[in-house]
Image: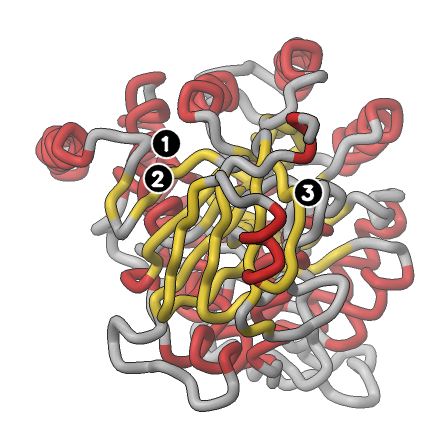
């Protein structure tokens, strides 16, 4: 038997949810892992006979599913929790979050905050995330050291920042980082325009040309795109989209503005495969269909959107393609399971559909579906195990519902990142938990002084 056909270990759960190619729940099945990849899956008895000498990881009351994918967050903001959170989003971003971030932002904050964020996500079963980082170079170094999988956002704005003086400088830094990580198996890059900081149509058009040359992805938050002057939607404006559209002279709803923003981006040429808009609660069914017609995607961050959009709700037919947690300064928890539950309730999704968004959906939006997002031979062994008896939620029949509506992130018992144990029996393996606790405490004291200032 060749080494390529020898499994290093077998994972034998009570239930196996491969997500693809079939949306099924398999009992009595196992997954064989070798060289960081899924070697095979099938009946546990057959795999034990096929690989008699490999290590067995038996989880008799657990469900095994693909590693969860957090399609949008800002990991370093784990250190900026505790701020007052009140929408609308753009006002909160500019008046509350941005001033503190500017005062406190440093390479140390991004490195330490990202380490804490990665550790928290691993504990919650998240094996891949897209990071809208203010200092992408520092975030990428932390990801490389931790040996996890991430896409790092390359910020772009016209306004000066601590890292670049204008859009040209931002693009120059992006080009250098792109060259550095072009061939990295775990770290990818995408463009993360920052419209709240100031972003002209000319710069967006320039970004489109650069992204086309690099075949790069672009992700932008709908609620950070400014309204036309004098037309900011007040909190009292209803969220229901009139079926006949908005007549000239009528007050447009929040969802109508979402469609207008998308149409504006379409005119610039940004709506294309590889483009994603964040903000399902700011998007109507018409907006979602507009994105889909151009091969673009919609990312939902339900909990943060609810906190920052007073009275907002999803409209029937608005189906996101992936889930994110957004900044933990707004949503607090980096918890994709909780986001899946919220999306299911808000958008009328089944538990299986919500789980697909949290796994393969995120992988598709991030361009990683050939590597992660489902339990299939040849894919990376990015896997999450959930204990369905830890809180008395052992399912009678519907395992997906037990996970989405009954389980919490505290029931994640084991996590593998490319076959490497990141969490075992609830214990973090890739980081020193005492060191992380000390780190968080030290930053809490330091940032309390910054906030008081």
Q: Is residue 53 visible?
A: yes
- Residue under pointer 3: 379
Pinpoint residue 211: horizontal percent, then vertical percent: 81, 29
Residue at 56% over, 14% down: 165
Identify residue for label 1.
114
Q: Identify the residue shown where x is 74% and y is 88%.
A: 242
Question: Cβ–Cβ below 8 Å for labels 1 and 3?
Answer: no
As drawn, is 68 to the left or to the right of 166? left
Q: Position of residue 63 (x, y in %)?
A: 45, 67
Identify the residue position indicated by label 2 in the image. Answer: 117
In the image, residue 248 sits, relative to residue 340, either above or below, namely below
> Residue shown at 55%/51% (left/top)?
69
Badge 3 marks a residue whose secondary structure is: loop
| Tag of residue 68 | none
Among the 4 quarters of the image, the one containing residue 346: bottom right
Judge whether residue 222 can be spotted in this image: no
């Amino acid at each position: 038997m060749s080494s390529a056909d020898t499994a290093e270990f077998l994972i034998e759960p009570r239930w196996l949810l491969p997500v693809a190619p079939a949306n099924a729940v398999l009992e009595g099945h196992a997954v064989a892992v070798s060289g960081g990849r899924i070697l095979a899956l099938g009946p546990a008895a057959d795999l034990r006979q096929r690989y008699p000498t490999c290590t067995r990881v038996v989880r008799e009351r657990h469900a095994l599913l693909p590693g969860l994918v957090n399609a949008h967050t800002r990991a370093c903001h784990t250190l900026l929790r505790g701020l007052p959170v009140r929408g609308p989003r753009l006002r909160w971003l500019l008046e509350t979050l941005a001033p503190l971030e500017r005062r406190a932002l440093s390479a140390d904050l991004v490195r330490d905050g990202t380490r804490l964020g990665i550790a928290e996500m691993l504990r919650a079963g998240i094996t891949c995330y897209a990071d809208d980082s203010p200092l992408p170079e520092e975030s990428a170094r932390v990801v490389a050291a931790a040996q996890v999988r991430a896409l790092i956002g390359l910020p772009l704005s016209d306004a000066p920042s601590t890292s670049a003086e204008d859009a040209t400088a931002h693009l120059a830094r992006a080009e250098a980082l792109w060259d550095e990580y072009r061939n990295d198996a775990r770290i990818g890059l995408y463009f993360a325009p920052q419209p709240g900081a100031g972003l002209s149509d000319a710069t967006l058009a320039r970004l489109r040309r650069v992204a086309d040359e690099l075949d790069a992805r672009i992700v932008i938050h709908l609620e950070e795109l400014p309204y036309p002057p004098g037309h900011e939607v007040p909190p009292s404006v209803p969220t229901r989209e009139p079926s006949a559209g908005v007549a000239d002279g009528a007050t447009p709803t929040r969802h109508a503005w979402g469609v207008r923003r998308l149409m504006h981006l379409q005119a610039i040429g940004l709506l294309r495969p590889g483009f994603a808009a964040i903000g399902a609660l700011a998007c109507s069914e018409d907006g979602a269909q507009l994105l889909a017609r151009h091969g673009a995607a919609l990312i939902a961050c339900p909990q943060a959107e609810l906190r920052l959009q007073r009275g907002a709700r999803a409209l029937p037919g608005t189906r996101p393609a992936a889930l994110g947690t957004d900044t933990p300064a707004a949503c607090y928890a980096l918890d994709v399971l909780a986001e899946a539950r919220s999306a299911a309730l808000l958008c009328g999704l089944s538990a299986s559909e919500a789980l697909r968004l949290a796994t393969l959906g995120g992988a598709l939006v991030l361009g990683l579906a050939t590597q992660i997002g489902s339990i299939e031979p040849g894919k990376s062994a990015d896997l999450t195990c959930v204990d369905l008896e830890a809180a008395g939620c052992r399912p009678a029949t519907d395992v997906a519902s037990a996970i989405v509506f009954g389980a919490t992130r505290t029931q994640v018992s084991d996590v593998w990142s490319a076959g490497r144990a990141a969490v075992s029996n609830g214990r973090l393996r890739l980081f020193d938990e005492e060191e992380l606790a000390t780190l968080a405490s030290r930053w809490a004291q330091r940032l309390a002084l910054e906030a008081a200032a």
